[in-house]
Structure formats: structure tokens, C-alpha cells
Amino acid sequence: MTKVNIPTIAKEVLSDLLQERGGILYSSHETLKPSSVYLLGFNPGGSGVKPLKEGINSMLSNSENAYLDGKWGNKSGSWGAGEAPLQKRVKWLLSELGLNPADVCASNLIFVQSRKASDICFSLAKQCWPVHEAILEIVRPKLIIAYGNSTDSPYGYLHAMFGDEQEHIPSGHGTWVAKGFQCHINGKPVYIAGLPHLSRYSPVGKNHIVEWLAKHL
């Protein structure tokens, strides 16, 4: 498997979704290489999202990273490139793990856009999963960091597919917890870490969370 195969796989398995707004990679095509971390959100949000087919066609030439270069906005306001709260939290966390955020492969569990998780069903996640499998076969991460860890979340979906016993770690924010479990994907061991959603939860300054993630790298 090489990255040149991914657009073909995506067009085959997502053929009925190609005109929907969304995207597969949130990072540069240059992140499609072996790396210790795969970053996984739920699904694309915000404005200015192009049809899925356009993103697939440009996947192997795209050099932008949504967390670094994207100008995000929502009902709360708008921000310059990389300055939205979620973007800053992702960058802080990856940097604290000793990683260059620009080098971390990032995607969403579900590739099509919706305003909230309740608008999306996990049948779409099942349809998108073969593309993730192809990406993971290339990236071969030791750690998948999923943000959002409720039942309807990327972590919840991965735990339903691959998980058994899980650990719970105080998040440092009220009663919210981080969750994790060890499993195998594509025959390779990987630890799945689920953080509370980073649009509401800030890991900044919570060194015990960084240390917990770092021990799985």
C-alpha cells in the first residue's frame, strides 16, 4: 500500500458521497508516511468545506494543514489561521509530545460534513473505515489520539469495533475523563486514546495527560 492508492480506494468506497461536502485529510499529503501518531476528529464542520470529490482529487498535492493554516469560524466568532481554540489546543498537545504538528497525519472518523454528531450515523463511519485502514497501513501509528470520547464519537466507534477493557484517566476538568485501550489494527498494536472534545476541553497545562499519552509513543 502506498499513498497513491488512497484516492482510488476513496472514490470506490465513497462513490455515493462524492458530491457531499467534506474531506479526508486534515493534514498535508506529506503526512502520509510512517509516524507515531494519527489524529482523529469526528467529522468536518464550519464553512467553506468543498465537495468530497474535490478533496480526493487534490489529496496527493495538498500541502495545507487545517490545524495550522485553516481560518476557522463558528457562532462564537472567527479566527486567523491556526488561531481558533481547538486548533491551538491540538498544536499545544502535539508539540508537548515532542511532535511537529505539521508532520502528524490528521483526519476525521466520518468524512462528510454535519453541524453536530447527532446528525451523523455510524453507518457512515463504517463506509469510511476502509479509507482509514489504507491510511493506517501507511502511517502505522503507535498511538491514535481521538478527540471526543462519548458513545457517539471517534473513540466510541473505535472502542465498539476493537476495544475491550479500557482505562479512565481524570482529565483535570470537572468529572470529564480521558479513556484508552490497547488493540490491533491491520495486525499492528496501537493504543487508542480518547480525550474529551477539544472544542470544549483544553489539555493545556494538564501535564498528566501529556505524560499518559507519551508513554504510548
Image (cartoon, rainbow, N blue to C red):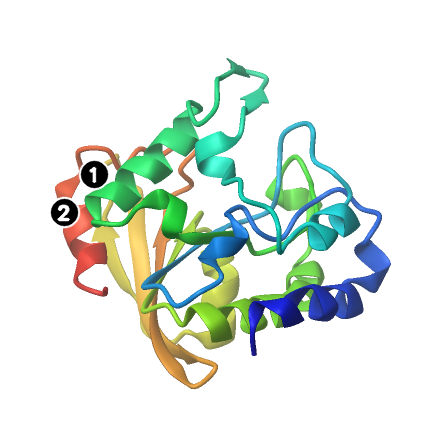
Q: Are marks 2 and 1 in contact (CB under 8 Å)?
A: yes
Identify the residue at horizontal 63%, vertical 68% (top origin): 4
Question: Which amino acid lies under the numbered mark 1 shown in the image of this protein?
Answer: Gly
- Up the image or down, 178 lies above or below 206; here it is below
Q: Which residue appears at 14% of the width and 42% of the height? A: 207
Q: Name the one closer to the observer, 95 or 115.
A: 95
Disc 2 secondary structure class? helix
Quarter-of-image position of residue 12: bottom right
Badge 2: residue crowd in 10 Å (few <14, some 14–19, many ≥20) = some
Residue at position x 17%, y 62% from top? 215
Dot 1: what SS?
loop
Three-letter amino acid code at disc 2?
His
In 3D space, how far apart are the residues under numbered discs 2 and 1 (Cα atoms)? 9 Å
Q: Quadrant of the C terminus?
A: bottom left
Question: Disc 2 vs disc 1: which is toward the camera?
Answer: 2
175 left or right of 70 in image: left
Q: Is residue 115 left or right of residue 108?
A: right
Task: Give the vertical position of 167 relative to 197 (above or below).
Answer: below
Residue occupying the far bottom of the picture: 187
Where residue 43 sits: x, y (%)? 60, 46
Q: What residue sits right under mark 2 in the picture? A: 208
- Tag shown at residue 172: 1
Label placed on residue 10: none
Q: Residue 17's spot in the image, x, y percent?
A: 81, 55
Q: Nearer the viewer, residue 195 or 60?
A: 60
Dot placed on the residue nearer the N-terminal end, 2 or 1: 1
Residue appearing at x 49%, y 61% in the figure: 32
